């Protein structure tokens, strides 16, 4: 039976992995019909659940109450999902102000219509905006039921209307603002059972971490760990230009002027800096300040259009335009053919090719459009006299300071260099970590880096007025912060943690700096304005940070194994087993808190989105490593470490693979 359960478990993982790639090729409707909603896939989960129940009882796992409760929670969650599938009703309803009431809703996938036990109508629909901007803050439908007495309610993003077991969510609206689309969910059995499973999971996770009799606490009391002295603390844890430049002192006058940009009020410096970075890939050009460059383009466009400052990375596009890495604005226009990129754009779209050249043309076209907006007067917009709150002097100075200090660049260079040097010190013939003074210096360096990073995040939070966790750049920043926090907690008596902390945070910040991640500060879109989302992202990033430590820990263990230092290997194995508990349990909690947020936001707690699927794959794969009693090969330290190193590829796939290859609702690639 044990082999049968393991086979079913692995088969599900393989199916999930394959399905995400099939979805990329065939589309979401295809995989929903033939895989996710198919009888054989549901039966496979059912067989796994029933066989797991039988095995848990046979092995008397119920004697270990916290472990038994954890497994029961997963079975309850699957039961709730099954009830949702077979008894739940999901669909959409279209309401118009000129139509009195509606008493049915429709499933867009099956085209099935369901009756409502009451009629519902639309009183009015409107969009609320961030003050003084055109950025939507919320979409609000005021509805009523055709009952006696009549019940009136508002439905908006993250605000549900529930009536007689039917839940209504804001989904979309008509272009004329006279109609609204609401998602409807009637799931009286599935949601309560599923949420009960989430509650059991939370209770069992705390029980495992806090119970004196749990395997986790037993590992913490291991004599080898005591000798090693690891204190395991998990905290909540200047050249002139040929073009006519504006004098710096004249340009600096505009530095603190307030303008509208990215649907928020910003200092002129922020707009100018983003303009220069977009064009050149750097925050300056030939020693000129961003204000000088933007004002130069604004006041002397005929001279600046001959300046080679538009960055082009694609070699093929460089050859087609006859320029180098930097092009002039005039290089993109021809007297006979006009805008040269239009010709290439049309040709590539007709061929249906989605290659690097088309991507480069798209990126370059955005730069040309930015210059066009500047010339047309639509890029630099003054702050309206009414309806918008201007920035305080303190907030302006905070944003200027944030723009002036390249936090990510400084940190990734220092952290990577520090990590490499510490690695060399650790594996030298005379390890410097034996000396207390060297360990103190290492701690001070790590603490300084952490405080500097914390200062940058506080500045960004203060400027934006929200927690910085809404896009790829910000989540990578937060993940690096969590990594350094964990390293500070663990490095005091375990020297490799400082090294791992520097390296992991350095690589994370490097990816955030050079990848296609947008560092611009923008208002939150309505659906993301939820404290549950912040908690979800925080837990997931914390888990990824711990799993990253486990991966580096495994690499170090293999190196020590090759040097025949068995005691070091055993210590690192013990540490990985300890870290694996909070890492995996926090990942599970993060996933299911995200499910609750999704259910509140759009009425579906699990949609088989590629990122949801890969997060589940990650959880399933790391969950295997706990079963040392039933899968005895995990008792071997080297196999255990190799498995966890390989398992980290699922984390990379969940974050980067989904974002930049598979796509989906959770993709940060375009943020």
Image: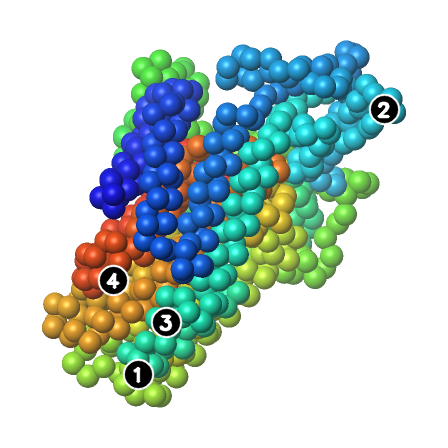
Examine the rendered structure and indicate whether residue 431 appears above or below residue 1. Answer: below
- Percent across and percent down for residue 437 are 35, 88
> Mark 4 vs mark 3: which is more N-terminal?
3
Placement of the N terminus among the 4 image quadrants: top left
Across and down, in percent, residue 17 comes to 31, 36
- State the SS at label 2: loop
Q: Closer to the camera: disc 1 or disc 3? A: 3
Q: Which residue is mark 1?
A: 227
The crowding category of the residue bearing disc 2, from other C-alpha atoms within 10 Å (few below 14, some 14 to 19, many at least 20), is: few
- Which mark is nearer the camera, 2 or 4? 2
Give the residue at x 62% y 27%: 186
| Circle 4 SS class | helix
Label 1 packing within 10 angstroms: few (<14), some (14-19), many (20+): few
Q: Residue at x 67, y 57 (%)?
A: 396
Q: What kind of element bears circle 1? A: helix
Q: List the residue tagged with mark 3.
A: 218
In this picture, is 352 found above or below 658? above
Is residue 398 among what the camera can see?
yes
**Mark 4 vs mark 3, CA separation in Å:** 21 Å
Whether tag 1 and tag 2 are in contact, CB under 8 A, the answer is: no
Residue position marked by numbered label 4 in the rendering = 554
Query: Counting residues from the N terminus, which is met first, the one under dot 2 or under dot 4?
Result: 2
On the image, numbered disc 2 is attached to which residue? 150
Location of residue 253 with respect to 325 vertically, above or below: below
Could you tell me how far apart the alpha carbons at marks 1 and 4 are, in whole angstroms? Answer: 20 Å
Between the residue at mark 2 and the residue at mark 4, the CA separation in whole angstroms equals: 64 Å
Disc 4 crowd, CA 10 A, few/some/many (<14, 14-19, 20+): many
Real-space Cα distance between discs 1 and 2?
71 Å
- Give the mark, 1 or 3, whose residue is nearer the N terminus: 3
């Amino acid at each position: 039976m044990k082999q049968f359960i393991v086979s079913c478990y692995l088969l599900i993982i393989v199916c999930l992995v394959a399905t995400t790639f099939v979805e990329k090729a065939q589309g979401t409707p295809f995989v929903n019909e033939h895989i996710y909603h198919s009888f054989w896939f549901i039966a496979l989960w059912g067989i796994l659940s029933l066989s797991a129940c039988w095995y848990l009882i046979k092995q008397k796992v119920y004697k270990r109450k916290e472990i038994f409760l954890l497994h029961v929670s997963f079975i309850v969650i699957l039961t709730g999902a099954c009830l949702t599938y077979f008894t739940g009703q999901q669909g959409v309803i279209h309401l118009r102000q000129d139509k009195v009431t509606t008493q049915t809703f429709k499933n867009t996938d099956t085209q099935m219509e369901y009756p409502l036990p009451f009629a519902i109508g639309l009183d009015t629909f409107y969009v609320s905006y961030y003050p003084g901007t055109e950025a939507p803050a919320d979409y609000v439908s005021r509805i009523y039921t055709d009952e006696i007495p009549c019940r009136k309610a508002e439905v908006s993003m993250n605000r549900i209307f529930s009536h007689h077991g039917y839940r209504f969510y804001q989904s979309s609206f008509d272009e004329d603002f006279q109609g609204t689309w609401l998602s409807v969910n009637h799931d009286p059995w599935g949601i309560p059972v599923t949420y009960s499973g989430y509650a059991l999971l939370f209770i069992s996770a705390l029980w495992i971490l806090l119970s004196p009799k749990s395997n986790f606490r037993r590992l913490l009391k291991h004599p080898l760990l005591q000798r090693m002295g690891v204190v395991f603390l998990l905290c909540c844890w200047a050249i002139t230009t040929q073009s006519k430049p504006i004098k710096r002192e004249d340009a600096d006058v505009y530095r603190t002027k307030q303008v509208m940009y990215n649907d928020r009020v910003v200092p002129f410096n922020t707009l100018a800096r983003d303009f220069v970075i977009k064009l050149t890939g750097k925050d300056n050009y030939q020693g000129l300040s961003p204000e000088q460059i933007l004002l130069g383009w604004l006041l002397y466009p005929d001279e600046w259009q001959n300046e080679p400052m538009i960055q082009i990375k694609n070699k093929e596009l460089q050859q087609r335009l006859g320029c180098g890495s930097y092009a002039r604005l005039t290089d993109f226009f021809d007297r006979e053919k006009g805008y040269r990129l239009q010709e290439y754009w049309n040709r590539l779209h007709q061929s249906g090719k989605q290659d690097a050249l088309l991507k480069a043309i798209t990126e370059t076209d955005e730069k040309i459009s930015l210059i066009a907006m500047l010339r047309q007067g639509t890029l630099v917009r003054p702050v309206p006299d009414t309806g918008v709150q201007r920035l305080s002097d303190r907030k302006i100075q905070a944003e200027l300071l944030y723009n002036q200090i390249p936090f990510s660049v400084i940190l990734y260079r220092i952290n990577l260099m520090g990590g490499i040097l510490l690695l060399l010190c650790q594996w030298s013939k005379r390890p410097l970590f034996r000396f207390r003074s060297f360990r103190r210096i290492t701690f001070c360096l790590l603490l300084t880096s952490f405080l500097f990073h914390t200062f940058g995040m506080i500045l960004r939070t203060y400027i934006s007025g929200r927690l910085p966790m809404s896009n790829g750049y910000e989540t990578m920043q937060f993940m690096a912060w969590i990594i350094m926090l964990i390293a500070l907690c663990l490095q005091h008596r375990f020297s490799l943690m400082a090294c791992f902390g520097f390296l992991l945070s350095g690589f994370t910040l490097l990816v955030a700096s050079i990848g296609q991640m947008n560092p611009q500060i923008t208002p939150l879109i309505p659906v993301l304005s939820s404290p549950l989302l912040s908690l979800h992202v925080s837990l997931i990033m914390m888990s990824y940070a711990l799993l990253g430590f486990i991966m580096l820990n495994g690499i170090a263990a293999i190196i020590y194994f090759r040097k025949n230092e068995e005691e070091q290997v055993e210590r690192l194995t013990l540490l990985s087993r300890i870290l694996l508990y909070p890492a995996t349990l926090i990942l599970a909690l993060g996933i299911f808190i995200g499910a609750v947020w999704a259910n509140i936001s759009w009425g579906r707690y699990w949609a088989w989105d590629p990122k949801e699927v890969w997060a589940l794959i990650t959880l399933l794969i790391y969950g295997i490593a706990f079963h040392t009693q039933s899968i005895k090969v995990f008792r071997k330290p080297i196999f255990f470490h190799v498995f966890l190193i390989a398992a980290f590829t699922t984390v990379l796939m969940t974050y980067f693979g989904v974002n930049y290859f598979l796509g989906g609702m959770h993709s940060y690639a375009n943020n």
